Image (tube, rainbow, N blue to C red):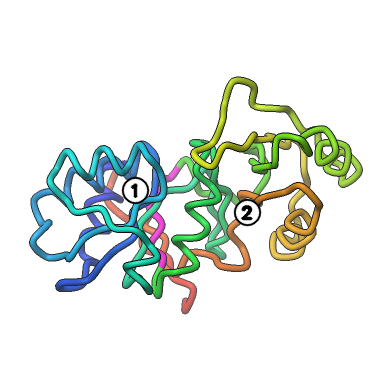
Amino acid sequence: MKQRAAEAALEYLGDGAVIGVGTGSTVNFFIDGLAARRQLIAGAVSSSEASTRRLAAHGIPVLDLNEAGELAVYVDGADEATRGLHLIKGGGGALTREKIVAAASRRFVCIVDEKKLVERLGAFPLPVEVIPMARNLVARQLARLGGEPVWREGVVTDNGNHILDVRNLGITDPVALEGEINQLAGVVTVGLFARRPADVLLVGTPSGVVTLTRDA
């Protein structure tokens, strides 16, 4: 199902464009499929060191976002997604770079298998990237919001920061909660993608791919 969604995303490539590429097991299928079509793109901006290595191994040029400018399309997975195209991301620890690349892209195509499609976000623990010295400060503030933050021990992000995974949050208003958590001192970013949701959600199922769009 992941591979089906990833292969469907290849149809969104623009001729000669620079694209954004995310992180994770579903995106790995996309990168492998992209290798056979690399002549269609000018290069890729990667959201993680792991994806950068995989792209380079396929001979796909990896560009710096500052040099690339606005991107035509960004393809990435999600840990949870709703039919409103709001997402939880960051299970792989690359949420800050993922959010930056998504913001720099004209179109965000999210690829998931049907197990990731939910009615309401929050069963998957919400990742929050924090400055290391502020980890306990932020954890106390997240607890006041009703969550149960747990430090992802032994994990340091590509930006040198820590991650708190927040369990048992009732996310009834993803846009408002994203803004509230992002304003906490010490937070780098939160893994809610609601203010800038996906534009297209490709859901892999046993019988094919279901396409959901914001316009719909």
In this rendering, the count of numbered labels is 2
Q: Position of residue 142 (x, y in %)?
A: 83, 42
Q: Position of residue 158 (x, y in %)?
A: 49, 39
Q: Quadrant of residue 69?
A: bottom left
Q: Crowding near pointer 2: few (<14 within 10 Å), some, many (20+)? A: many
Q: Earlier in the sequence, mark 2 or mark 1?
A: 2
Q: Which residue is found at the position 62% from the left and 37% from the top?
A: 161
Q: Is residue 179 left or right of residue 87?
A: right
Nearest the viewer among 56 and 91 is: 56
Amino acid at dot 2: Leu
Q: Position of residue 149 (x, y in %)?
A: 77, 33
* Residue stretch rendered in magenta on the structure: 108-114
Q: Which residue is found at the position 24% from the left and 39% from the top?
A: 54
Q: Main secondary structure of the magenta part?
A: strand
Residue 135 in the image: above or below residue 11 = above
Nearest the viewer among 72 and 119 is: 72
Amino acid at dot 1: Gly
Q: Is residue 155 left or right of residue 13?
A: right
| Numbered label attached to residue 114 | none
| Disc 2, SS | strand
Q: Is residue 51 left or right of residue 81?
A: left
Q: Which residue is found at the position 49% from the left and 36% from the top?
A: 92
Nearest the viewer among 178 and 45 is: 45
The residue under label 1 is 204
Q: Crowding near pointer 1: few (<14 within 10 Å), some, many (20+)? A: many
Residue 109 colored in magenta in the image: yes
Q: CA distance from mark 2 to mark 1?
A: 22 Å
The residue under label 2 is 192
Q: Residue furthest top?
A: 154
Residue 162 in the image: above or below residue 75 = above
Quadrant including the N terminus: top left
